[in-house]
Image (tube, rainbow, N blue to C red):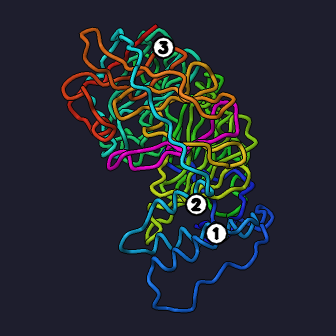
């Protein structure tokens, strides 16, 4: 797998990558030259020739050289060399220097959440029984999805729930597993309550379709779907077969079909499957984010390589992280404006602001350490950061919702002066106990929250690993 080289201006990938099994994307290997654009860059700076110089001296040399350099191309190379030196400081790894490089020398702009918050009391609508929430497990369970303007769904391996915009249950189905546990997507509804799943048997390699009452309707083998894929599905590896394994599926933007990903490893293909088993193979490359409900699919990829497109499909963010070695935990993000940043503990929560090419990147491992969200403009320039974790889009249609370590929901937007906090909310149940959001749909006034023992005053780490609280659908407004 091709990685961005440290200390160089990375190659700009100009194609949509292939697909991966776990509800995410994967890059192609050995992309042909015509699918890449390259940048010519000056030779990197060289530290003093003393091989015995300590790590801090090396960091200081590159940092000082970078700080004094004003040529963008040279500065970009030096930025990579500074971070490389930090990573290879085995004793201390001064992350603050690497963070300064991410900011391109700009001062730290940390948003401070106001002390006062508006209290919102929820109406509890439904409890997802026999569930717990922890990101220490893989895959996380349940999974939550927005599939249309008026429908949201939740799935575990054994059960699926479909709700309308008022929080009323449209379907509550039980999956008849045999010896299989289901792939990480577990199952997928369309708005009328029909649903599909796979792995009733281990590695069954077929879709099974049911109506909203759980009556089995049909099966569709992966081989049958593969026969409908165009021959040029994967131009990077011509002649390589795609396996019939079904990696993931979800409702398409029409609400009448499912978007289905097929294949394993780097050989992937996609198809649209209708309720009558009609299969429409998709050409490669395809902007799959346009094939589902807007802003509902998130990143695609593997744990080492991830991708997301902007709402208009004109820009993308690529995240690349080595699978092993010293660079693990130091992923590279290629942002709009062709700017590359190496972010310490950058995780898989990143993307675009609504209807914008401005971006955000979350740092920190949610189950292990505190998180922050960093913000960048449409050219990749640092704007600011806030302690907390990314949660959702706001009902305003242009802002982001961040959850702070008190469990509050903070709305971040822009005004003439730059980043601003426009509101802070804390959710509670009718008995006054704290409701901690897991997934919310602000325009619907609807979300999945934790309720029960230990949820009062949870910090972000405890919220992500709490196994005793119930998961409850709540409504407000």
Give the class, few, some or many, for how many residues have Cα within 10 Å of label 3's Cα (few <14, many ≥20).
some
Q: Residue 10's quadrant in the figure?
A: bottom right
- What residue range appears in magenta? 349-374
CB within 8 Å, label 1 to label 2: yes
User: Which is more N-terminal, label 1 or label 3?
Assistant: 1
- Under circle 2, the secondary element is helix
Can residue 266 be seen in the rendering of this structure?
Answer: no
The x, y position of residue 220, in whole percent, is: 53, 36
The x, y position of residue 284, in whole percent, is: 72, 49
- Under circle 3, the secondary element is loop
Give the class, few, some or many, for how many residues have Cα within 10 Å of label 2's Cα (few <14, many ≥20).
many
Can residue 289 be seen in the rendering of this structure?
Answer: yes
Per the rendering, the mark at residue 101 is 2
| 366 falls in the magenta region | yes
Q: Residue at x 32, y 49 (%)?
A: 368
Q: Which residue is mark 3?
A: 445
**CA separation, marks 3 and 1?**
48 Å
Per the rendering, the mark at residue 66 is 1
Q: Is residue 92 above or below residue 362?
A: below
Q: Is residue 55 above or below residue 31?
A: below
**CA separation, marks 2 and 3?**
39 Å
Per the rendering, the mark at residue 196 is none
Q: Residue 9's quadrant in the figure?
A: bottom right
The x, y position of residue 295, in whole percent, is: 60, 31
Marks 3, 1: nearer the viewer: 1
| 108 falls in the magenta region | no
């Amino acid at each position: 797998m091709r990685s961005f080289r440290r200390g160089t201006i990375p190659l700009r990938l100009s194609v949509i990558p292939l697909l991966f099994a776990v509800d995410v994307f994967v890059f192609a290997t050995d992309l042909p030259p015509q699918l890449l654009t390259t940048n010519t860059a000056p030779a990197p700076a060289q530290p003093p020739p003393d091989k015995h110089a300590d790590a801090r001296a090396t960091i200081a040399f590159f940092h000082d050289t970078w700080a004094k350099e004003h040529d963008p191309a040279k500065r970009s190379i030096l930025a990579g060399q500074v971070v490389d030196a930090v990573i290879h400081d085995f004793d201390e790894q001064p992350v603050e220097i690497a963070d300064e490089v991410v900011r391109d020398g700009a001062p730290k702009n940390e948003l401070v959440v106001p002390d006062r918050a508006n209290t919102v009391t929820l109406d509890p609508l439904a409890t997802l029984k026999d569930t717990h929430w922890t990101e220490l497990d893989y895959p996380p369970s349940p999974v939550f999805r927005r599939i249309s303007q008026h429908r949201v769904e939740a799935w575990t391996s054994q059960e699926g729930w479909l709700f309308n915009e008022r929080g009323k249950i449209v379907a509550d189905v039980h999956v008849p597993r045999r010896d299989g546990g289901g792939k990480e997507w577990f199952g997928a509804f369309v708005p009328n309550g029909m649903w599909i799943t796979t792995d009733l048997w281990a590695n069954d390699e077929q879709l099974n379709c049911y109506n909203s009452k759980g009556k089995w309707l049909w099966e569709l083998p992966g081989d049958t779907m593969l026969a409908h894929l165009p021959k040029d599905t994967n131009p990077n590896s011509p002649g390589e077969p795609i396996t019939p394994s079904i990696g993931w599926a979800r409702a398409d933007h029409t609400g009448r079909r499912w978007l289905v990903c097929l294949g394993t490893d780097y050989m992937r293909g996609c198809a649209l499957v209708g309720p009558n088993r009609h299969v429409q193979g998709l050409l490669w490359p395809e902007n799959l984010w346009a094939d589902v409900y807007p802003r509902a699919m998130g990143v695609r990829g593997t744990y080492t390589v991830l991708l997301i497109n902007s709402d208009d499909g004109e820009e993308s963010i690529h995240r690349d992280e080595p699978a092993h070695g010293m660079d693990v935990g130091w992923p590279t993000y290629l942002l709009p404006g062709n700017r590359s940043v190496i972010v310490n503990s950058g995780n898989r929560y990143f993307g675009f602001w609504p209807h914008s090419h401005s971006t955000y990147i979350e740092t920190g491992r949610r189950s292990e350490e505190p998180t922050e969200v960093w913000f960048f403009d449409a050219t990749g320039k640092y704007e600011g950061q806030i302690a907390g974790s990314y949660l959702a889009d706001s009902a305003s249609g242009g802002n982001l919702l961040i959850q702070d370590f008190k469990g509050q929901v903070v709305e971040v937007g822009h005004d003439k002066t730059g980043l601003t906090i426009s509101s802070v909310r804390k959710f509670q149940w009718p008995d006054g106990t704290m409701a901690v959001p897991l997934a919310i749909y602000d325009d619907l006034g609807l979300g999945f929250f934790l309720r029960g023992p230990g949820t009062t005053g949870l910090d972000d780490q405890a919220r992500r690993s709490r196994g005793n609280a119930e998961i409850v659908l709540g409504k407000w407004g």
